[in-house]
Image: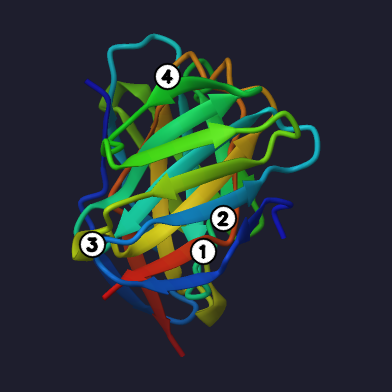
Amino acid sequence: AQKVTQAQTEISVVEKEDVTLDCVYETRDTTYYLFWYKQPPSGELVFLIRRNSFDEQNEISGRYSWNFQKSTSSFNFTITASQVVDSAVYFCALRGPTGNQFYFGTGTSLTVIP
Amino acid sequence: DSGVTQTPKHLITATGQRVTLRCSPRSGDLSVYWYQQSLDQGLQFLIQYYNGEERAKGNILERFSAQQFPDLHSELNLSSLELGDSALYFCASSVVGITGDNEQFFGPGTRLTVL
């Protein structure tokens, strides 16, 4: 069964703190794809990153970084020096080798306090 | 702006009614996906169309149906509406949709309120 777990329902941090959002996934596929999306208060879902199962290299994009570890089935997302504009709900998602079902976690609501 | 458009933005209707939500994918995207986001269920995949054909079904109720037209826009029809159908409905599109390595780009959503 495919499943994504985001155990942290809500997180609050003070501006400039670092914060890590956890994502744990379950799949029997050997080829799969992991995604992170951001949903700001305005409601739209914004694509942040895609990672395939064969590429465990960590990625950094500005203040954002992602740590993919197949051994622990985790794909964690870290925001460095958080800003108020980072306040949003963040979703982790999983897709199998075909472009069909997309499994989302329940999301982590991040509040950055000025 | 993702390039995916959805209309209307807001829809208020009564129980028992029928509504149609519309989605236009990004230019060149052949796949369209529909999702329902409610407070208690999170983001749920409903259905996918690829180039006019149904490709995958998720947790879509029998009261709901969708189609994708030759110009690739899609419509989600919700009938015999119940209070519990109140949610944010998202449409997403991707380039191919056959393989899993294409990210989906989401529209702004349609907020449906059933009174």
Chain of the residue where label 2 is placed in the rendered structure: A
Disc 3 to disc 1, how far (Cα)? Answer: 20 Å
Mark toward the viewer: 3 or 1: 3
Disc 2 residue type (three-letter): Tyr
Q: Are marks 3 and 2 on the same chain?
A: yes
Element type where label 1 sits in the image: loop
Disc 4 residue type (three-letter): Gly
Disc 1 residue type (three-letter): Thr
Pointer 3 with pointer 1, Cβ within 8 A: no
Q: Earlier in the sequence, mark 2 or mark 4?
A: 2
Q: Are marks 2 and 4 on the same chain?
A: yes
Pointer 2 with pointer 1, Cβ within 8 A: yes
The residue that disc 1 covers is: A80
The residue that disc 2 covers is: A64
Disc 3 to disc 2, how far (Cα)? Answer: 20 Å
Mark toward the viewer: 3 or 4: 4
Q: Is residue B26 above or below residue A57?
A: below
Q: Residue at x 74, y 52 (%)?
A: B3
Pointer 2 with pointer 4, Cβ within 8 A: no
Give the left or right position of residue B28, taking residue A3 as reference: right
Disc 1 to disc 4, how far (Cα)? Answer: 30 Å
Q: Earlier in the sequence, mark 1 or mark 4?
A: 1
Q: Earlier in the sequence, mark 3 or mark 2?
A: 3
Task: Estimate how packed mark 1 is, as few (under 14), some (14 to 19) or many (20 or more) residues with alpha carbons within 10 Å.
Answer: some
